[in-house]
Amino acid sequence: MILAALGGNLPVSGIGTPRDVLIAAAQALDTNDINVIDLSPWYQTVPVPASDQPDFINGVISLETALSAAGLLARFHEIEDAFGRIRGVANAARTLDIDLLDYRGAVVVPPDVVPPGGQDGLVLPHPRLQDRAFVLMPLYDLAPYWIDPRDGRSIGELIDRLPPGQACQRLSL
């Protein structure tokens, strides 16, 4: 199973609200070489870390592809760019963020541990997913039996250990 998180808190002209942007991004991902299998419910979440930014809309998708993890991540960046993503300041407001959470259970260590010629900075599973309600709650909806391949913890255990102060509200359809 391949899992990715979608999030954003800024509208895009000609597309609409952040929720509209995420829906359009999920459709843009579903191409000849990427097949979107399922999509979680959307969640409205406060920014992490806390700030005066607008709330985010977040969700998780499952997909299948023959692309490598690095190739898929590159495609995510292309789609983010097409939706007006501006990179620069960490944790800044953004139109679209697509994070690769899990690529078929692969564990890829941080880049400072990977030998030269390694995975180009790719870290799997996503290194901060266990700290983020806005990832774990929709991930639970989509894959309630998911196990973190790094340490064998269930998604329920990860949710139980979330740091406090992360308001995360499931949105109605």
Image: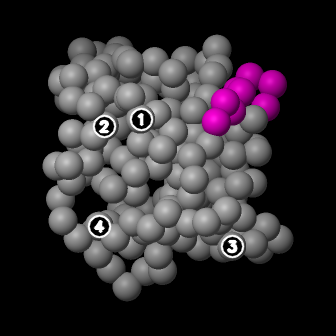
Is residue 153 covered in magenta? no
User: Can residue 65 be seen?
Assistant: yes
Q: In which quarter of the image is residue 62?
A: top right
Q: Identify the magenta region.
A: 31-38
Front: mark 2 or 3: 2
Q: Which amino acid type is shown beneath numbered disc 4?
A: Gln
**Disc 2 vs disc 4: Cβ atoms closer than 8 Å?**
no
- First in residue order: circle 2 vs circle 4: 2
Q: Which amino acid type is shown beneath numbered disc 1?
A: Pro
**Disc 2 vs disc 1: Cβ atoms closer than 8 Å?**
yes
Q: Residue at x 38, y 72 (%)?
A: 46
Callout 2 crowding tier (Cα within 10 Å): few <14, some 14–19, many ≥20: many
- Total marks shown come to 4
As helix, strand or loop, the secondary structure at mark 4 comes to: loop
Disc 4 target residue: 166
Disc 1 target residue: 144
As helix, strand or loop, the secondary structure at mark 1 comes to: loop
CA gap between label 2 and label 1 equals 7 Å
88 shown above or below 53? above
Q: Which amino acid type is shown beneath numbered disc 2?
A: Ile
As helix, strand or loop, the secondary structure at mark 2 comes to: helix
The picture places residue 23, in percent across and down from the top left corner, at 71, 55
CA gap between label 1 and label 4 equals 20 Å
Disc 2 target residue: 155
